[in-house]
Image (cartoon, grey):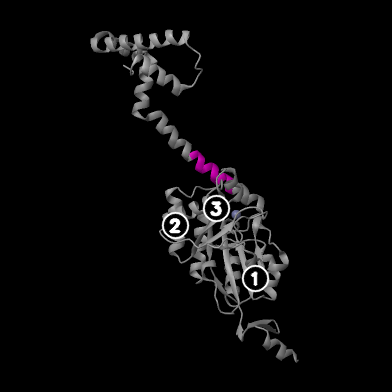
Amino acid sequence: MSRWARALTSHKFQIGNRLFNEGVLLPKAPTFDELKDFTLKSYVKLLQYLTHIYKIVPFCEIPRKNIPYLILRHDIDISLAAALKMAWIERNLGVRSTYFVLFSGKSYNVLEGENVNILRQISKLGHEIGLHYHVSQYRSYGRDVKKTLKMEIQLLEHLLGRKVYSIARHGPWDRDPFATIKQYINANHPRFRRNVFVHDSARAWTPLQGLLKALNDPPRRVQLLTHPENWQEEKISREALLERFFQDAEKKNKAHKRQLKKIWQTDPSVIEYEAFIEKGEFTQIHNQKIKSNPKMQSKLKRSLNYYGKIFRWYMINTSFGWNIHRLREIVQSKFGPTP
Ligand SMILES: [Zn+2]
């Protein structure tokens, strides 16, 4: 077979330094140097290149036809704001993907109003929202893990007002009780593991050969997982980025503390309460009220008599132990209801 014939039978070929895919001139692939910097600019370049080779799809829309496709997946581990930014970039490139959201992580609370709002915006941009489940957390609840998964999905569906089809596991790849679950599309299902699977966890392209293959000799099926927070406007080191996440979290915590402190210090009921305690007015007023109110006096007397009788009786008959329900039963049958 001639060089040309060989070139034309594969769906991607090179003439000189120009790359073609099924006869169409490809945009330049980003270099590895660009991709290891994790800038949004190189992410755009990567997607622009991949859209010419693959149909890029979210999990819920995997084509049935035998065409080359790339499933684009995002696990939102740290930042919903970064996810929204990425969702906009993809929307502008005409790309749709699946964003997996984590309920049981430490970095964000899905149930905060502003976060639900972000998820709805991502969904409105045409992307799929799936559940990023956390098996070891589920196990720590001591409940049925399948039921926990189902309930998180139901909650997510309720918040989004649309059906959730896809799930993906967060954390290590040990035994996954949902890997072959029938009701949902699981990104970790063995059928997807047969594809080339490349991810950028902790800003390390894994497996590196997988990435290079997707760029230079594209296989027909790829699952590409990127974590939105990994990709930033400017070049920033892994360590500095981590530092930035925690500085942001600290800022948020400080704002929360200020808000709480304001309530704790300025709430009228707190001020009133503290004033009473400080001046000893509360005890005075309480005693005065009782002294000046014959009804309260007799109630207090009745109450003291009642509990006094019980105490005396209890000191003599302690054989039933400390069972509070039994004590209540005996007391009520013997002394009548509380005055
Ligand atoms: Zn994760």
Residue at numbered disc 1: 30
Nearest the eye: 180 or 129: 180
On the rendered structure, is 275 left or right of 143? left
As shown in the figure, which amino acid type bears the numbered disc 3? Answer: Lys
Residue lying at 71% horizontally and 63% vertically, measured from the top left: 207
Residue lying at 63% horizontally and 52% vertically, measured from the top left: 171
Residue at numbered disc 2: 157
Residue 139 disc label: none
Q: Position of residue 192 (x, y in %)?
A: 63, 67
**Contact (CB < 8 A) between labels 3 and 1?**
no
| First of labels 3, 1 by sequence position | 1
Q: Position of residue 5 (x, y in %)?
A: 71, 91
Q: Is mark 3 within 8 Å of ligand 1?
A: no
Residue 146 disc label: 3
For the magenta stretch, what is the residue range? 245-254
- Judge whether residue 17 can be spotted in this image: yes
- Disc 2 crowd rating (10 Å Cα; few below 14, some 14-19, many 20+) is some
Q: Position of residue 303 (x, y in %)?
A: 33, 12
Q: Secondary structure at mark 2?
A: helix
Q: From mark 3 to mark 2, how far is it between C-alphas?
A: 16 Å
Compared with residue 286, is residue 163 higher up or lower down, i.e. above or below?
Answer: below
Task: Find ligand 1 in the image and state its quadrant.
Answer: bottom right
Q: From mark 1 to mark 2, how far is it between C-alphas?
A: 37 Å
As shown in the figure, which amino acid type bears the numbered disc 1? Answer: Pro
On the rendered structure, is 309 left or right of 228? left
Nearest the eye: 339 or 287: 339
Residue 251 among magenta residues: yes
Overall secondary structure of the magenta stretch? helix
Nearest the eye: 160 or 51: 160
